[in-house]
Image (cartoon, helix red, strand yellow):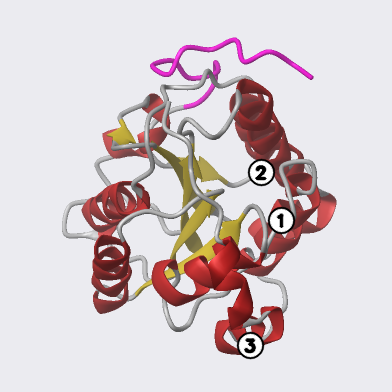
Amino acid sequence: MNLKKLTAGLFVAGFMSVTTSAQAIPIDLALSLVIDVSGSVSTAEYNLQMDGYANAFRNGPIQTNLLSGTNASSAINVVFFASNFFTTSLDSFVILDSVLSINNFADTLDNFARPGSGGTAIYTGTNRAIDLLLAAVGAGGPLEGSSNLIIDVSGDGTSTTTSDQAARDRAASNSIKINGLPIGGVGISNYYAANVITSNGFIEPAANFTDFNDAVARKLRVETGGTVPEPATLALLGIGLAGLGAMRRRKTA
């Protein structure tokens, strides 16, 4: 396991924020990865998450998907959350338009220092991602006019239900899809299906952080152009409402 070497305020050499562009950049996908770094996520588990994302972006089929659209280009950013969101250099969207740029982005994720810790407030990460997406695709934004907008939330806990639902509904009202990668048992999967993802979104559960690597690869294959799995409502029925009573409680930092 590589130690995370970069501070949250630095880019790997060769990366540029697209927010400096004066002209809109045509893309096929704008994807915001919203990642849980709250207190129940240990340092080892944080590393497993970041390594999982890095390995997924090195995955051949995912790279092919990213480069196979009309514009052969996608924009990705990362939002970290705990009790609140953390502001980092990864807030800015990075354009992935070649195998080299994708591999460089994977290296950035693989070495990115954890920005903090705290309690759990999923909606803070979701709302931050919405704000950044709307700013990027709105008038004068670097991704102006882009319409394929996805937020990808991963985490191992729950937060304030009404606030999570409000963030979900805000995303939907702005034509932003939210998918979820719940880490844990049936309870957390049910919570994400009922309160975090949008009606057109889906969940790809990971049984634990060790399983995260495979789950995130499956999820990104779909989000970058693969076959969409069964609707979230069917998945919810499949995993069973009885598991709600066993919902995992989060630890505070």
User: Few, some or many C-alpha atoms within 10 Å of disc 1 (few <14, some 14-19, many ≥20)?
Assistant: many
Q: Nearer the viewer, mark 3 or mark 2?
A: 3
Against 241, is 145 above or below?
above
**Is 4 on the left or on the right of 38, as rendered?**
right
Residue under label 3, please give it: 237
> x, y (%) of residue 10?
44, 15
Residue furthest out toward the left: 139
Looking at the magenta stretch, what is its main secondary structure? Answer: loop
Which element carries disc 3, helix, strand or loop? helix
Quarter of the view holding residue 226: bottom right
Give the Cα distance between marks 2 and 1: 29 Å
User: Few, some or many C-alpha atoms within 10 Å of disc 3 (few <14, some 14-19, many ≥20)?
Assistant: few
Residue under label 2, please give it: 98
> Residue at 60% of width from left, 10% of height from top?
5
Q: Amino acid at mark 1?
A: Ala
Q: Which residues are magenta?
A: 1-15
Q: Label 2 near label 3: C-beta < 8 Å? A: no
Which element carries disc 2, helix, strand or loop? loop
Quarter of the view holding residue 215: bottom right
> x, y (%) of residue 39?
47, 30
Q: Amino acid at mark 2?
A: Ser
Give whichever of discs 2 and 1 has the lower sequence position. Answer: 2
Against 62, is 37 above or below?
above
Residue under label 1, please give it: 206
Against 195, is 155 above or below?
above
Give the Cα distance between marks 3 and 2: 40 Å
**Is 68 on the left or on the right of 158, as rendered?**
right
Q: Nearer the viewer, mark 2 or mark 1?
A: 1
Which element carries disc 1, helix, strand or loop? loop
**Is 14 on the left or on the right of 116, as rendered?**
right
User: Few, some or many C-alpha atoms within 10 Å of disc 2 (few <14, some 14-19, many ≥20)?
Assistant: some
> x, y (%) of residue 251?
48, 36
